Image (tube, rainbow, N blue to C red):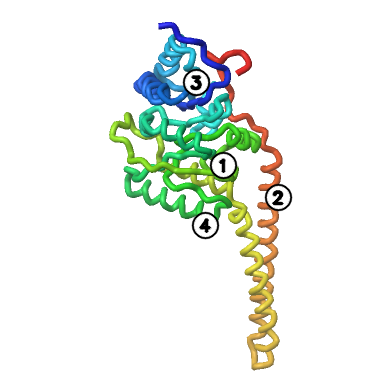
Amino acid sequence: MIRKAALVEPEISVVIPCYNEAENAADIAAAIIAALEPVCTSFDLIFIDNASTDDTVEIIRAMCAEDPRIRLIVNTRNFGQMRSPTHAVFAGRGRAVIGICADFQDPPELLPRFVERWRQGIDIVLGVRESEKTGAMLGWFRSLSYTLAKRFGDYPIVPNATGFGLYDRKVVRAIAALKEPEPFFRGMLVETGYSIDTIPYPRPKRQRGLSSNTFFTLLDFALSSLASFSKKLVRVPLYVGVLAGALALVSLLIAPIAWLLGGGGLYWLIAAAIEAQFAMLFGFLGLIGDQVRLISERTRETPLVFERERINFPEGY
């Protein structure tokens, strides 16, 4: 069967991050194609390999030779679970981009529903897991990270949304314009302010392999979320400084009253001096933290990844 050449700007681009997915690469591609062919006029699949140590690249390279709709980006090294997928999302030229995992933890059967909601005018459509099968420690830490993000974050993170979903091209352009060197993509989706819809789904029973997410991976995600999207957190020292300053003022006012009532005024003066020092220290730290945040926002120029090669990308893609 002779296939027509893939369009430079397809309707949908599907991004599939890979790390040691030799077992799943061909099957996930077939499942995605089967899900999208009935509903899309044109689409392409963009695999991005994060320095796999198995045969993932060779398998996808052979798939690219057979189907021009399948493309591959090979990174020079492992750039992590935030930078590599985001780089591939930016590389997509579809009118909308879909992000999905290669190991079937995200069900390809949901893709037509994503496309349907998008065509109805929704800019961002996210799959949300109804339950998470994790150990007690990881479950507790995940819950804590969502609580911290909700309490201190500037934007509401969608719980149990992993990034599996569809993003309109204008959303992708808005996120790319931020030039964030460590992109917490699911948080940046909310930051754009575009319309979001969610589709709940149960955790698939046919997930293959073990998740590479560990306690430290989740800690990295949580810290990235707070560091990237929390003015409140960096301003906590300022709040502490204001509180200490207020306490110093109260102690200073109480000191002469205590002196007139028979003693203890000296202790209140000492307390006021200590509290005033804390107020200046934390106030200074808070101002430095806010300045560092502003500097970071003005200097987002770090490349997300360095590519070793691109396969099946037409000229001008």
Instruction: Report the front residue among 62 and 119.
Output: 119
81 relative position to 134: left or right:
right
Q: Give the residue at the far front of this rendering.
A: 120
Q: Identify residue type, mark 3.
A: Ser
Question: Residue 285, how many percent across, how many down?
Answer: 67, 56
Question: If you read the primary sequence from the N terminus, does the residue marked by circle 1 or circle 4 appear first?
Answer: 4
230 relative position to 41: left or right:
right
In this rendering, the answer to whether 60 lies above or below 219 is: above
Q: Identify residue type, mark 2.
A: Gln
Instruction: Report the front residue among 140 and 201.
Output: 201
Residue corresponding to mark 3: 42
Contact between labelled residues 4 and 1, with CB atoms less than 8 Å apart = no
Q: Residues within 10 Å of mark 2 (few under 14, many from 20)?
A: few
Tell me the tag on residue 188: 1
Q: Nearer the viewer, mark 3 or mark 1?
A: 3
Q: Identify residue type, mark 1.
A: Met
Residue corresponding to mark 4: 151
Tell me the tag on residue 291: 2
Contact between labelled residues 2 and 1, with CB atoms less than 8 Å apart = no
Q: Secondary structure at mark 1?
A: helix
Question: If you read the primary sequence from the N terminus, does the residue marked by circle 1 or circle 2 appear first?
Answer: 1
In this rendering, the answer to whether 16 lies above or below 290 is: above
